[in-house]
Amino acid sequence: MGRSDKEHLFQLIAQVAQAIANPHRLELLDLLVQAPRSVEQLAIASALSLANASQHLQRLKRAGLVIGERQGTTIRYRLADPGVARLWTELRRVAVSQLAEVDRALDRYRPARRRFPTISVKDVRAGLARGDVVLLDARPALEYEAGHLPGAISIPIDQLPRRLRTLPKNALIVTYCRGAVCVDADEALEQVLASGRRGARLEENVAEWSQAGGRVEHGAVAL
Amino acid sequence: MGRSDKEHLFQLIAQVAQAIANPHRLELLDLLVQAPRSVEQLAIASALSLANASQHLQRLKRAGLVIGERQGTTIRYRLADPGVARLWTELRRVAVSQLAEVDRALDRYRPARRRFPTISVKDVRAGLARGDVVLLDARPALEYEAGHLPGAISIPIDQLPRRLRTLPKNALIVTYCRGAVCVDADEALEQVLASGRRGARLEENVAEWSQAGGRVEHGAVAL
DNA sequence: ACCAAACTCAAGTAGTCTATTGAATAGTAA
DNA sequence: TTACTATTCAATAGACTACTTGAGTTTGGT
């Protein structure tokens, strides 16, 4: 139990940090927080070459952050533990609050984020209980099926233009997506507001909702 | 708001992760979670050369994780935000729970950790309220002064042999130190138990106690 | 048995990170 | 001014990391 044991311990913990110390691997994690996926799906979603995505995923696997399971001919990767989602959330929070540069990058990526109203988890819960809030999940159907907020309806952002008119006129339409580093809910909210409806954005994602004690529903899109 | 803005955003967040992706910088952070210190103090405590410690600290500063303030001739580094301590805690938790290798390294660094009884924050609170628990802070006095659990007494591990007899015989002696990656509380507990007293170790450190809603006391050693 | 699909592996190059050394700077004290 | 202390800076060699390309492996279908 000397210094070399201590160094070894910190060395191992640092290896986990190294695994998340790469922008592409963070994007892969952010995708996997939403839903398990195959290597090819992940490569496409993150605009990586197949071999590159595979290698990044293996690095995450070696660090114990994700698990890859063979399902017939494909390999399905998923988060190894909900703690991994918490780690990613905490990293994002620190980065956003401590580096002004990250805040500026967020403004560039999500130019509308300060213009639009936001709403808290607590107020959404109350609104759902009263029945005067409609929760709109703007993510791809795949992610909605893997887990969504109770009572949320699935309208992937690319389907919203033709399904906008099905939304009630008198409710508050609350949009959400993958969370702080995702624009889908912003774009959905833009269309909602442009249609004359009232709306707000929930900043949290499904993982954060769940961490805040919220129940998560699974299963197919209700039609 | 295209892919390049998204890539830039992930790039910046990854820079924060890179800052913690080094064993020496993690050790520096672990020290700074306990108390602010000068470059020289940090270099000595982490067994780094002065120039090397300085460079690592600057990297942490650039990532917004620590702040360095000139105080006369020395520069005092401290955590930039309590969120940084949470990030380090979360990283440690994920590493310990997901990598069996980390668990083994912990066993080597803290061989007694499974032999000795542990106690939860909740039970310590109750025991303190009843008055049948003595809380022993085994860290250096500097760290005790920067913040300790309410009612804890300071007996740095190197002073324990000669102050052991001042501890009551009939109370439960609960030891704590910097947390999961620190052996001081183990060593203190070993001596406490060897003296025929009852004892237990608190795994949490001051930062985690505080995150769990506990109050933290500041100020000099009570004699 | 053979083929195709979905991944993984190996090797190479360009780029990045680390620790050390010795020099430079900013405050303090005489 | 000068000397001294605490810290930072600059340069460098050696060690890792990332992405690409092309070849290899495993599974399922025909």
Image (cartoon, coloured by chain):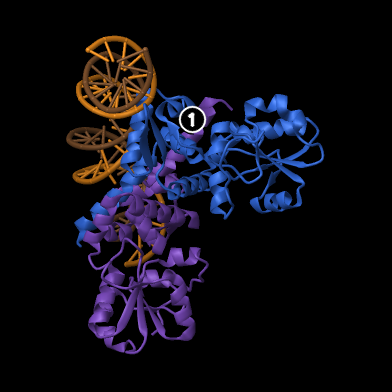
Chain colours: A purple, B blue, C brown, D orange
- SS at mark 1 in the image: helix
Against D20, is A137 above or below? below
| Residue A2 image-quadrant placement | top right
Closer to the camera, A172 or A16?
Answer: A172
Give the residue type that dot 1 points to. Glu
Residue at 28 percent across and 56 percent down: it is: A103
Against A172, is D12 above or below? above
Residue at 47 percent across and 28 percent down: it is: B46
Residue D21 falls left or right of residue A20: left
Closer to the camera, A129 or B124?
Answer: B124
Q: Is residue B218 visible?
A: yes
Residue at 28 percent across and 49 percent down: it is: B12
Against A214, is B142 above or below? above
User: Label 1 neighbourhood size at 10 Å, few (<14), some (14-19), many (20+)?
Assistant: some
Residue B100 falls left or right of residue A160: right
* Count of numbered tags: 1
Image quarter (top left, top right, bottom left or bottom right) of the C terminus of chain A: bottom left
Image position, residue B178 (x, y; %): 56, 38
Q: Is residue A47 visible?
A: no
Q: Which residue position is annotated with label 1? A: A7
Image quarter (top left, top right, bottom left or bottom right) of the N terminus of chain A: top right
Residue B200 falls left or right of residue A191: right
Against B173, is A161 above or below? below
Image position, residue B207 (x, y; %): 53, 46
Image position, residue C17 (x, y; %): 31, 34
| Residue B137 image-quadrant placement | top right
Chain letter of mark 1 equals A
Image position, residue C1 (x, y; %): 34, 53
Residue A111 falls left or right of residue B203: left
